[in-house]
């Protein structure tokens, strides 16, 4: 939290508001009272090397990026988001990418009637609204902030706001005692995180101030690792709940800290990767990318699919779970917590219902993966299913799972072949599904499809829209123009 110290407000003391706040952040009348509502701090990978306290010149850029209004009358509030970006000057007249980014959310409220000393004493005795944390902390420490601590922190951070320093002005703003600084609770949160995980470097902290903390009241700073003892992403990624409790035990500040985030790495990719259209990139697009997209040869598809999916079923089982299926799940009961497997079964059931699957129907599942839908349709709907995939491991796994479920090979099976070589059957396939393989839609299915075919496509990139039309696309994009292409079979209603 040392970034809080080195860049004081730029206004002269004579330019500050009567309460000591910076006019640059003020949204205007009637919003005359300011408090710290929360914020976040992000640390770029390697920021420690960029921002050491070694005497180098650093730069802070401050921007008011958003102002939001909420409520009406005496309940009206104005929220102001101030972003500060800290970096080291490069010595050539420019600046490096931000090493630290901080959002400060300030809330401004209308003036209120001042508290008398008796009213302040009564307010101190009345129990506040308590919001208890649902967790027991893994690590915590307590302290009682006094006037000296608040004065020292104000001086250290060049904070002249009177609610931290002047008891009379604090009463005038409707508070019973001096308030603890928002940035001070942020610094305490970082201290608690260092105590809870001394060898971990926090990459991001998001927090929100729920209620005020007052001078003289005992507070406790708490940390608990989410899913304690487990990792929540890559092997080195961890998350923590961090909160500050007031004297009655209710939460006054609540937040979440992270020590790693793949999205942030992508956001900072311009720091370590250049994106230029080079000769080698031109050759790749012309001789490799374009032919693969346009030609789509059997050998090309076989190479790409098997290189990806034949790496080992144990590897995929670690993150796909026992169903071995990528596709989404659907919640059927909002009043209880369903498992991932239940939600996946719900989705498979909807697929079967939407295509009107009946016992004895012949079903072709193109790009079937490990055959999960084909097995589900065979076991619970009595379908005669054929799944098609280029993955050798997927074929073996899917057929083995069918046999374990008591589904004979004469009823259903998984075939390892290109979708353009789909085996024909007498009478053709009554129903065809294609979940997340729409990019291979050029298959000419008319040779193997019976009239009355219903299509059921899914895309992982778009919101799902359930339709009762004969062509039931599980995707919100408009694919109707594809229906006229020669590779689509008859789509008349069954």
Image: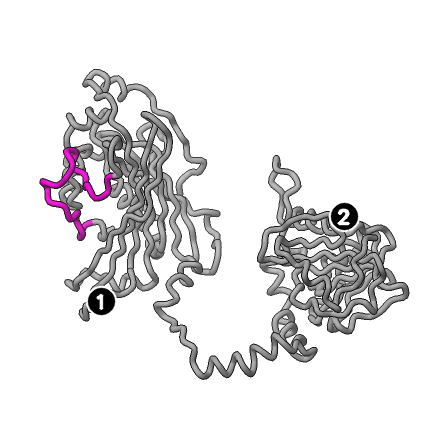
Residue 488 horizontal/vertical position (percent): 75, 65
Q: What element carries label 2?
A: helix
* Quadrant housing residue 445: bottom right
Q: What stretch is highlighted in magenta?
A: 5-26
Mark 1, Cα crowd under 10 Å, few <14 / some 14-19 / many 20+, is few
Secondary structure found at label 1? loop
Q: Is residue 462 magenta?
A: no
Of all residues, the one furthest to the left in this rendering is 14
Q: Look at 60% across and 57% down and name the residue there.
A: 460
Q: Is 155 in front, or is 39?
A: 39
Res 347 visible: yes
Counting from the top left corner in percent of width and height, residue 355 is at: 77, 52
How far apart are labels 1 and 2 at the CA level? 62 Å
Which residue matches tag 2?
353
Crowding at dot 2, Cα within 10 Å, few <14 / some 14-19 / many 20+, comes out as few
Q: Does the magenta stretch include residue 10?
A: yes
């Amino acid at each position: 939290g040392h970034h809080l110290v080195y860049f004081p407000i730029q206004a002269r003391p004579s330019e500050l508001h009567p309460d000591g706040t910076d006019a640059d952040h003020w949204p205007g009348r009637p919003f005359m009272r300011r408090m710290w509502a929360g914020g976040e701090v992000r640390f770029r990978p390697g920021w420690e090397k960029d921002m050491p306290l070694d005497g180098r010149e650093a730069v802070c850029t401050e921007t008011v990026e958003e102002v939001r209004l909420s409520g009406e009358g005496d309940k009206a509030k104005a929220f102001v988001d101030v972003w500060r970006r800290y970096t080291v000057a490069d010595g050539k007249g420019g600046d490096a990418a931000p090493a630290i980014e901080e959002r400060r959310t300030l809330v401004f409220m209308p003036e209120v009637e001042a508290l008398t000393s008796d009213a302040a004493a009564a307010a101190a005795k009345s129990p506040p609204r308590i919001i208890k944390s649902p967790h027991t902390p893994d690590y915590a420490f307590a302290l009682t902030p006094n006037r000296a601590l608040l004065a020292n922190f104000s001086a250290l951070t060049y904070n002249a706001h009177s609610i931290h320093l002047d008891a009379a002005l604090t009463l005038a703003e409707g508070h019973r005692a001096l308030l603890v600084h928002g940035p001070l609770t942020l610094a305490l949160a970082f201290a608690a995180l260092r105590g809870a995980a001394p060898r971990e470097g926090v990459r991001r902290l998001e927090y929100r101030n729920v209620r005020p903390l007052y001078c003289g009241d005992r507070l406790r700073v708490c940390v608990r690792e989410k899913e304690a003892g487990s990792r929540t992403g890559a092997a080195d990624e961890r998350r923590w709940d961090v909160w500050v409790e007031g004297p009655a035990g209710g939460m006054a500040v609540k937040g979440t800290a992270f020590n790693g985030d793949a999205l942030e790495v992508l956001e900072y990719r311009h720091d370590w990767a250049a994106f230029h259209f080079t000769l080698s990139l031109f050759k790749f697009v012309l001789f490799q990318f374009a032919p693969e997209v346009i030609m789509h040869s059997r050998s090309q598809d076989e190479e790409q699919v098997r290189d990806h999916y034949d790496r080992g079923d144990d590897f995929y089982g670690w993150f796909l779970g026992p169903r071995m299926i990528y596709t989404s799940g659907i919640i059927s009961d909002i009043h209880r917590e369903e498992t991932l497997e239940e939600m996946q079964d719900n989705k498979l059931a909807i697929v079967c219902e939407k295509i009107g699957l009946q016992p004895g129907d012949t079903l072709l599942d193109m790009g079937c993966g490990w055959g999960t839908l084909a097995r589900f349709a065979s076991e619970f709907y009595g379908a005669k299913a054929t799944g098609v995939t280029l993955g050798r491991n997927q074929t073996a796994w899917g057929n083995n799972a069918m046999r374990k479920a008591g589904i004979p090979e004469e009823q259903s099976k998984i075939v390892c072949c290109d979708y353009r070589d789909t085996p024909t059957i007498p009478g053709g396939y009554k129903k065809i599904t294609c979940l997340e393989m729409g990019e291979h839609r050029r298959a000419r299915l008319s040779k193997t499809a019976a009239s009355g075919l219903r299509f059921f496509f899914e895309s992982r990139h778009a919101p799902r829209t359930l339709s009762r039309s004969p062509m039931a696309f599980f995707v919100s994009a408009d694919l109707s123009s594809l229906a006229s292409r020669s590779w689509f079979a008859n789509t008349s209603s069954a």
